[in-house]
Structures are given as C-alpha cells and as structure tokens.
Amino acid sequence: MKHISFAKLLLASACIAAPMAFAAPLQAATPANMLVIANRIDDITSVDPAEIFEFAGSDMARNIYDKLVMFDPLHLEKGYGPGLAESWTISEDGKTFTFKMRKGIKFHSGNPVTARDAAWSLQRAVILKMTPSFILTQFGFNKDNAKEVIKAVDDETLVITTDKKYATSFVLNCLTATIGGIIDSKLAMEHEKDGDMGHDWLKTHTAGSGAFTLKVWKPNESYTLDRVDGYWRGNVAMKRVIVRHIPESATQRLLLEKGDIDVARNLSPEDMAAVAAKDGLAVDKELRGRIMYFAMNQKDPILSKPKVRTAMKYLADYDGMVNSFLKGQYAVHQAFLPRTYMGELADKPYKLDIAKAKSLLAEAGYADGFKVEMIVRNAQERVEIAQSLQNTFAKAGIKSTIQTGTGKQILGIYRARKHQIYVGAWGPDYPDPHTNADTFASNPDNRDEAKLTGKLAWRNSWDIPEMTKETKAAVQETDRDKRAAMYVKIQKEHQKTSPFAIMFQKIEPLGRRANVKNFVMGGAISAAYYWKVTK
Amino acid sequence: MTSAIEETELERRTNASPLPRILKNLTGSVLSIALTMIGLLAVTFIIGRVMPIDPVLAVVGDKASKEVYDAAYKAMGLDRPLLVQFLIYLKDVATGNFGVSTLTARPVAEDIARVFPATLELATIATLLGVVIGVPAGVIAAIKKGSWIDQLIRLVGLFGYSMPVFWLGLMGLLIFYGKLDWVAGPGRVDVFYDDIVPYVTGMILIDSLLAGEFDIFFNAISHIILPAFLLGYYSLAYISRMTRSFMLEQLGQEYITTARVKGLSEFTVIWKHGLRNVMVPLITVIALSYAALLEGSVLTESIFAWPGIGQYITIALFSADMAAVLGGTVVIGVVFIALNLFSDLLYKIVDPRAR
C-alpha cells in the first residue's frame, strides 16, 4: 500500500482552511418588513393551545390563534373586548353565555371560522385534560359533559353553560387565555390519530386564524411566523417574524447593537443600561405578572408560629435588593395579585426591620434564633435573593442554609411539602384575580393525601377554611367593584397572616432598535403581540 | 530443524482461507460494540432514573393537578418496573425507535438528525484547524526546544487550556464581530437565509453547495469561522503539546541520528522520518480531541447560538427528557466507536507493522 505523506495531508488541509480565513461576512440588517427577536424559547414543548402553558409558547400562540374575546394590544388596560365573538349575552341566572360569532373570518387554511369550531376547540381542551385545562374545568366542565355545556346552536351561535353563577369578568377573562385559542376543527380532525382530536399533529403544526401562521418551529433554535394577508383586525406591517433562541444576554446585546436583531428580550441589567445609553437603541419596561416570594411550610413547628412568620417578613431587605442586583428587573410588591390586576393592593407594610423581627422572635420564644433550610432553583436572581435573605436572617440569629437545584428538583420537594422555606416565583395563568387568589388564598383540603399540588397554600400546609370561603365568594360576585373590594380585603388579611412573604413583581425590560414601534410584551395580563409592530 | 508435522501445520495455517478469521474478528467487534452500547445505555438509563428530577413535571408543568400528573406518569410508562422500562427501551432502540422527546414533541431521531450535523460541521472544521496549526506548531516547538519559539508555543497552548471558553467566546464575538466586523454573529446563517437550503446532510456548508446557493455558503462560513476557531484553539493547544512531546522522544532516537549521518536534509529527517513515526499516537490524540468536540460544547453552542447536540442533551438532561438524553448518548457512543475503528484503519495505513 502506498504511504500517504503526512506533510501532503497537512498541505491539503491548509488549502481547505485558508479560504475560510478570508471569507467576508455578508452585511446583516433586518429588512423593513421583518421582525427578528432574540429570546429564550427553550420552554416551548408544544404549539397546541390546549397544552401550551409557558411564556415563550404563549407568545407564539397569541399571534397565531384568535379567541372569542381578546385584548387590544395597545390598550391592555381596557381589558377584554370582542374577538371572534362580536357580542355575547348572559342569562338571568348568570350561568349561560351566548356568543354571536363574527362573520366572514377564515382560518389560515381558508375554512370559515364558525361557532362549531369554537365549541370543538373548547370541548377539546376540556376532554384532552392537559395541564392548562383547569382554566376551563373550574366552571364545572368535564370530559363527560363538555359536549353538552359547550355547544354550537348553529354556525354563528355558541352557548356555554357553567355549573353555577360566576363573575362575568372571570369567565370571559379565562377565555382570553392561551387555552381559549380557536382551532380549525376540519383541518385538525384530518390529522386525528386514535381519537386524539389532532393533538399529536397540533403539537408541531398550527391551525389558527390569527395574524400569523407558523412557518417553522425548530425546538431550542428558532421559530418563524409568516403574515396572513387580510387579517380581520387590521393591517399587519411585518411580513415575517423570526424568534431566535439566544440564551446569553451579552450575545443578545451584541446582535442588537449590530442590527442583526430588532428586539432583545433577555438583557441583564448591565446590558440593558448599555443599550439604553446607545444611539439608535431604546429600552421599554413593562410590569409583568410574575411574583417573587418566599414561603414557609406550616408543617414546621417553628415556622408555623404566627410571630415567627411575621418576624421573617421583616427580615427581607426589599429595597436593598431592588436597588442592587434586581435593579430594573423587579419592583417591591407585597400582595399576591400583581399590580394592574383587578383588586390590586399597593400596600407595602413590610420593610427590613431587624429590631422588630428580633422582638417578635423573642416573643415567640426564639430570641436566639433557629436553624432553617431554604430551597431555591439555581437561577442567578433567585439564588441571589436567597443569599440576601440568608444574610438578613442571620442578623436576627437565624442560621439558614441554601439548597439549590434544577427547577424540577426544587419543585419536586416543594410539591411534596418537604421543604422548610421555598424561595421562588409564581406567574398568573389568566388575567383574572382568581388565578392567584385560588392558589395563594384557597386550600379546601389540607390533608397530605388530598395532593392539591397546584395550590401554593396546600404546598405550604396552610389550613385556611375561612379565607378559602372568602376566595370562593369573590369569584362568584358579579358586581365588579364589590368583587375588587373583596380581593383587597383578602389580600390585606393574607399580608398579615399568611406564610407567604411576597416581595417583588417582575418588571420586564426589553431592548429594541429605536425604529421598532408598538412591540407589546403583554403586561401582567397577556403575552407578546407582533401584529401591531412597525419599523 | 522443523519436523514434517510442524511443516504441515505451518503450511495449513499459511494457506488457510482468511475468511473465518475475518468473520471471527467481525463477530467479536459486533459483539463488543453491542455490549458497549447496552452498557452505556444501562448506565445512562439508571442515572436518569435515580436523578432527583421528576420527568413528569417536565411534561405537565409545575401547576398540573394530581389527575393530570398521574395520567402523564402512566402514559410515560413510569408505573412499570425499572427493568421492564429499560427492556422496552432497548427493544425500541433495536428497531430504530428512540422515542419521542418530551421537550420538542418530535421523534428523538428527527431531533438528532437536526442537531448533530450542526455539531459535526463545527467540530470537523475546528479539528481541521487544530491539526493544521497544532501539528506544525508542536513539531517546531520540539525542534526549537527551550528557545523563545518553544516558550511562545507553549504559552499559547497554556492560554488555550486555561482560559474559560465562555470568556474567550464573548471576547471573540466582541472583537471580531462587534468591533472589527470580520465575521458574522451568532447562529448558523443570517436569518434571511434560514430554511432556504433543502436538508440533505444537515450541514449547511455542504447543503448550500449542493443547492448551488453560494451566497449562503459564504454566509455560513462567516458564521462558523469564529466558533470553529475557538474550539480549534482548544484542540490546537492539546494537539501541539502532545506533538511536541512525541517528537522530542523521536528526535532522540538512533534512526534520526543515522538519517542525519547519511546526509539527509533536516527537513526530510524531521518532517518525513520523525513525524511519520509519531503518527500512530498522534492519530489517537486527534481522534480523541475530535470525539470530544463531537460530544458538543455546551458553552460554545450557547454563546454562538449554535443548535448542536451538546445543548440538546444538556437541556434534555435538566428537564429529565430521558428519551432525548439516551438518544444523544447512543449517538456519542457510536461516534466514539466509529472514531476508534477509523483510528485503527489509519494506523494500518501509516504503519505497516500494524497490518
């Protein structure tokens, strides 16, 4: 066999590599009718509205699927308004909602949008019973009665009957959630497999009537939306929207500065400050729905003492944190409903007060403090919050250790009620106060075997029969003002007695090219809207 | 003197058909590969199951009710004994079914066909750079042992070893993309070129050439060059150090002195005789370095938004997406085995004694 000279091999390799060193980059600037966004999108695991429950997926679905009732992106404060349903009436007993569908609207496939599609979509969400299904099943819908209580009388009339009277705003707000997306039933059923109502196909394909259609979704990499011409709500300036998975803040900033992206969604405070100072770039901030808190398990003999709970709330350096490592990312907020929600409470009764905390601890019999463990997901801001708490707890003699882990590890402990103190976040599921009231202030069965893992009050073994009743009453109150007042009252009580120290509400900053206008992240109540964006 | 019986035996062995020997070797190799793969899968499977991560939560989310959770638990087959779960998995893998990723909602095989070519492309160019620069650098360092050139090459190598890839990547981006504008930014191509080239190999450089899309080819080069140089630098540091060490050993051998005494030029002595004799260990070093890059570099992929297998497996691991983790493990196992076989083949080409 002929020997191959190694020197020749090297020479050949050099010849291949050399042109690469001279490869000039092509000029990159996003076209005027294309919006390129950098975001972390690795939480998208499905594009089926019956299954989507995370932030990035909700952003995507919001632009593909229309709902019966919808928000105006530029006027979120006005609340819901007509969407695919142009009007609705409510029966005298408050249990039957009759929706009249808007005429002449088509799905991306060309099929007309009818009340039958709307009924099928909502029935499907109930029957498939995926994680977000509770948003609909809380009205008494279930697999067996779904086709009876959600039905189309004809192509234009949809009737929904709830099991009891609920606040109108509660029902309609829930229909604005991602799970309320109306699906092209004909197209989806063409892909049905083993009675899955098209779920397997809809996990990776879309069949909506929104401003955009999904061109491609490459998990953990990007997704591309293409404009649907003639969108019924108005002109859509962007012909294409590309969302790229760029996990690093520094990388997002570089891309933004170079003009390779139009919007950066995950900039760190340092990068945000640099972007704000640069010509041609701008920064927006929106108050989002996420609440940051720490919770004390009431199974713990020390943490279950009311004075210890109160003392702990005086041992968080709220202002110190938002003025340092959380600057621009969070605002101090101490009630379970995010600001901008109906019934919001702006009171901030707690601040760092070591002397008061010590005194309360002494009254509770713990003048020398005690030992406690905090569990926290290994995300930078959460770990830093836990460290700050560790530092301020120590000033009152409380020796705390921090156990970090992946989100799934820590949540596993939390859901099993095996923690002492949990430091973490909670985001509302739909734009109605009941979403947070039901988890923070309701616990119908405190037994372990009840396994009400979706309720934070249960996770912390907080037995609150009275507050649970009040929460239930609030969700059935039809008078809007009275209902708001009820939530304010519950939150005031919650602030005083609960094992939750609610600390912050998320502010989401966004870096953008200055020519990008009307990019709405969705505030505290919704998700991102791309169809109003102009450049 | 050899006896008649011994002569007959020798003759029989010499004239015997090589087929049984080849078959025996082949059977041995296949068995060995199969056992290695099963062992690898078993270990990964057990680690995946004993990790304190709840795979059901990854699917249903934090807010799922008990009913939803229980339904998913059953649907994922987690109610069965561990051994049964593993055997079912093995049976599926044997038929080419790696399962469906809970994170991407797609078959794992489809995911891997998407992410592995990205890593393969990057690792191949990086290794090429590592070899093209690292081997000559190592040889020169050995020839000039103790000189400033040697010290410089060692220093560059040491820098490559010690600098965090995260920092180096960001600095590279800042300087060559942000300031000098010599290369394109993160990603495999500019967004306007996304999804234009039809998928053939999954490697954008090759697919764009096959499609005759030369603009995209050059754009892809401008995107890959920086991450490839970064990874190539780490590869280079390792290869140059090992080459230096191997060459120093060879340069002290008698055959080198003999070659010089015979009047051969210094170039021939070093680059032909010396280098040829270090090729066997060097091939092992290069193969190992290449295999390490083919596992994917999570940090590099993260900084350069490079959708490769490293990031895929890491995200899957943290979300307890075991179908994806096991699928990725199989690919990496196959890569290591394939590179081992390839190295064996190369030994035989460069060293007649190994045939």
Image: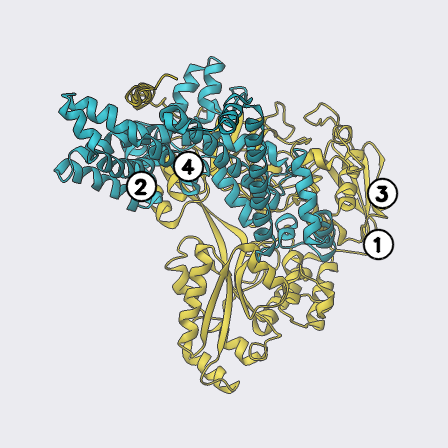
Chain colours: A yellow, B cyan
- What is the three-letter code of the residue carrying label 1? Asp
Q: CA distance from mark 3 to mark 2?
A: 59 Å
Dot 2 crowding, Cα within 10 Å, few <14, some 14–19, many 20+: some
- Residue B274 in the figure: left or right of residue B31: left
- What is the three-letter code of the residue carrying label 4? Leu
Secondary element under disc 4, as helix, strand or loop, is helix
Residue B336 drawn above or below residue A3: below
User: Is residue A533 visible to us here?
Assistant: no
- Residue A371 in the figure: left or right of residue A275: right
Label placed on residue A147:
3
Percent x, y of residue A223: 55, 32
| Residue on which the image places disc 4 | B293
Subunit of label 1 = A
Name the residue nearer the viewer: A202 or A184. Answer: A202
Q: Nearer the viewer, mark 3 or mark 2?
A: 2
User: Is residue A181 visible to us here?
Assistant: yes
Q: Nearer the viewer, mark 2 or mark 4?
A: 4
| Residue on which the image places disc 2 | B168
Same chain letter for marks 3 and 2? no
Same chain letter for marks 1 and 3? yes
| Residue on which the image places disc 1 | A93
- What is the three-letter code of the residue carrying label 3? Lys
Q: CA distance from mark 2 to mark 1?
A: 67 Å
Dot 3 crowding, Cα within 10 Å, few <14, some 14–19, many 20+: some
